[in-house]
Image: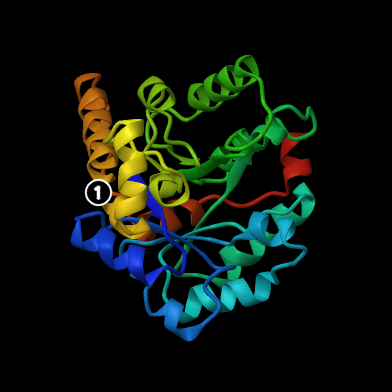
């Protein structure tokens, strides 16, 4: 399992993470607005998210054409689709980005909201049939889903993504979930908790409160990184013992595999 740290446009965290050996970072197009922030991008290791959800909660919209222009300009290799509240628009964006960003593998995203909607439950099967070998799984973090629904959602996903289909868990770093299902990658901003709250994974609540008064916020975040690094290592070791290891996702190969399949619209394919 590969852990992506959500840094977006923070130079402080970008440099601190790289120095600590945490090279995989997730950045949001929505927050990469200035030229300076875009110099932080490492196209070989970064995963790009459109930031569509952040834009919506801030009353903004993202133009898929601008997103495509950005991906091409910065030679991004792996990026998520620009998903919206409309599944039809999301599917249109997937097709647009696949067509107009020939050197970027665009990860489609399958949400728990798709799973619970009879009209779109088969979207995951559709993405697989259309040759997508790396798929984002989202809509769980921060949502008000009951545990039984989440369990059924994950079981559905991983019953269909065996073999060479990689899954990325959006906002998923629960040890229980990472140990229960063979994720290829995941991302989370939870490592930033020491900066936001007086809590740490590597210190007691009492010590975390002391450090909150005596250490800068970024120092506390970096002090807590060993927990996340250990989580990544132990998860990979566990799945290796279970007989599952993942080769590095190569964007060129992923694009080639995707393009070998003649594409159909979802509604036509479903029928």
At x 42% / y 35%, what residue is drawn? Answer: 173
Q: Quadrant of the N terminus?
A: top left
Q: What residue do we see at 47% from left, 85% from top?
A: 35
Residue at label 1?
A: 223
What percent of the width, then of the height, locates residue 81? 59, 57
Figure quadrant of the C terminus: top right
Instruction: Say how many tags the image has.
Output: 1
**How would you rate the neighbour count of disc 1 (Cα within 10 Å): few for under 14, some for 14-19, many for 20 or more?**
some
Q: Quadrant of residue 198?
A: top left
Q: Is residue 59 left or right of residue 54?
A: right
Q: Residue at x 62, y 14 (%)?
A: 148
Residue 232 x/y as whole percent: 27, 37
User: In x, y percent, where is residue 54?
Assistant: 65, 58
Q: In this view, does 23 lie to the left or right of 75?
A: left
Residue 114: tell me if it is visible.
yes
The percent position of residue 53, horizontal first and vertical second, equals 66, 54
Q: Quadrant of residue 128?
A: top right
Q: Is mark 1 on a helix, strand or loop?
A: helix
**In-front residue for pair 151/115:** 151
């Amino acid at each position: 399992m590969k852990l992506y740290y959500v840094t977006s446009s923070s130079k402080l965290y970008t440099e601190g993470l790289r120095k600590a050996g945490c090279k995989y970072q997730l950045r949001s197009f929505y927050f990469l607005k200035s030229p300076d922030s875009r110099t932080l991008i490492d196209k070989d290791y970064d995963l790009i998210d459109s930031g569509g959800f952040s834009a919506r909660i801030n009353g903004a919209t993202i133009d898929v054409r601008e997103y495509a222009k950005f991906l091409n300009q910065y030679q991004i290799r792996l990026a998520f689709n620009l998903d919206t509240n409309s599944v039809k628009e999301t599917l249109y964006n997937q097709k647009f980005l696949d067509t107009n960003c020939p050197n970027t593998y665009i990860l489609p995203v399958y949400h728990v909201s798709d799973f619970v909607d009879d009209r779109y439950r088969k979207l995951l099967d559709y993405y697989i049939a259309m040759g997508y070998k790396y798929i984002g799984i989202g809509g769980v973090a921060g949502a008000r889903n009951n545990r039984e629904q989440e369990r059924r959602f994950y079981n559905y996903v991983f019953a269909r993504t065996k073999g060479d289909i990689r899954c990325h868990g959006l906002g998923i770093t629960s040890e229980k979930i990472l140990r229960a299902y063979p994720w290829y990658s995941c991302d989370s901003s939870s490592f930033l908790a020491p900066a936001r709250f007086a809590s740490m994974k590597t210190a007691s609540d009492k010590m975390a409160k002391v450090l909150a008064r005596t250490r800068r916020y970024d120092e506390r975040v970096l002090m807590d990184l060993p927990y996340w690094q250990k989580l990544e290592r132990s998860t990979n070791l566990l799945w290796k013992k279970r007989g599952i290891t993942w080769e590095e996702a190569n964007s060129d190969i992923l694009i080639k595999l995707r393009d070998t399949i003649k594409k159909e619209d979802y509604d036509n394919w479903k029928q």
